[in-house]
Amino acid sequence: MSNFLNNQNWRYATKKFDATKKVSAEDLNTLKEAIRMSPSSYGLQPYKVLIIENPELRAQLQPAAWGQTQIVDASHLFIFVNETNVGDETIDQFLNNISETRETPIESLAGYGDFMKSKISTLEPAVKNVWASKQTYLALGNLLSAAAELKIDVTPMEGFVPAQVNEILGLDKQNLNASLIATVGYRHEEDATQFYKKVRKSQEDLFVTL
């Protein structure tokens, strides 16, 4: 088995973090870069990632996350927030980034920009919000894999009340929405779930070749 698969088998959704252990600045930067390099639809990355270190703020957020202790005990709290107003402005910013990065005339990207706008800007707000939220899951996947390579624990969470998190962090006023939470740090030796065998479908049950 490859190291990658071994590390995937090692990782699990940590239930109890060791609050005394902190992720180093170097490893944190690696995780941030892994998220930054994540794929997304059109390459737009219509989201931000809030890294909450302030203990008072994390304590305030804990009730909105069903009181889960990982929120306050993990080394870092990542909150993936998607844009709720993805439209022409977001696309134009992306095109400018392409032009600068690849040293390509902005005029040559007009057709691509018009195509994206015709597919995204015309979506109903609720549909657009769901689409943008889905992009954060791709970024989470990169975080999970990169962290496992570094033997850093990550617990992905959908168990929270987005409206409450949005209110606490003032996200609505920024046209942002809390989509996902990931707690990052190191498992506590008392977390019994680390010793459980990983339960997954067999390849025969999971894959269908047509």
Image: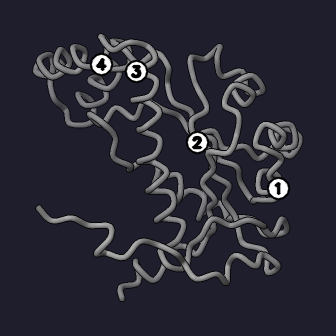
Are the residues at dot 2 and dot 3 in contact (C-beta closer than 8 Å)?
no
From what the image shows, is residue 126 above or below residue 137? above
The reply, left or right, for residue 116 in relation to residue 26 is: left
Amino acid carrying mark 3 in the image: Val
Q: Which label's residue is closer to the chain start, 1 or 4?
A: 1
- Residue 67 location in percent, x, y? 83, 47
Numbered label attached to residue 47: none
Which residue is tagged 1? 69
Which residue is tagged 3? 127
The reply, left or right, for residue 32 in relation to residue 173 is: left
From what the image shows, is residue 3 above or below residue 156? below
Are the residues at dot 1 and dot 2 in contact (C-beta closer than 8 Å)?
no
Amino acid carrying mark 4 in the image: Ile
Which residue is tagged 2? 180
* Mark whose residue sits in front, 3 or 4: 3
Q: Name the image quarter holding the N terminus.
A: bottom left
Q: Which label's residue is closer to the chain start, 2 or 3?
A: 3
Say which element carries label 4. Answer: helix
Amino acid carrying mark 2 in the image: Leu
Decide: few, some or many residues near mark 4? Use Cα within 10 Å; few <14, some 14-19, many ≥20: some
Are the residues at dot 4 and dot 2 in contact (C-beta closer than 8 Å)?
no
Q: Residue at x 45, y 48 (%)?
A: 139
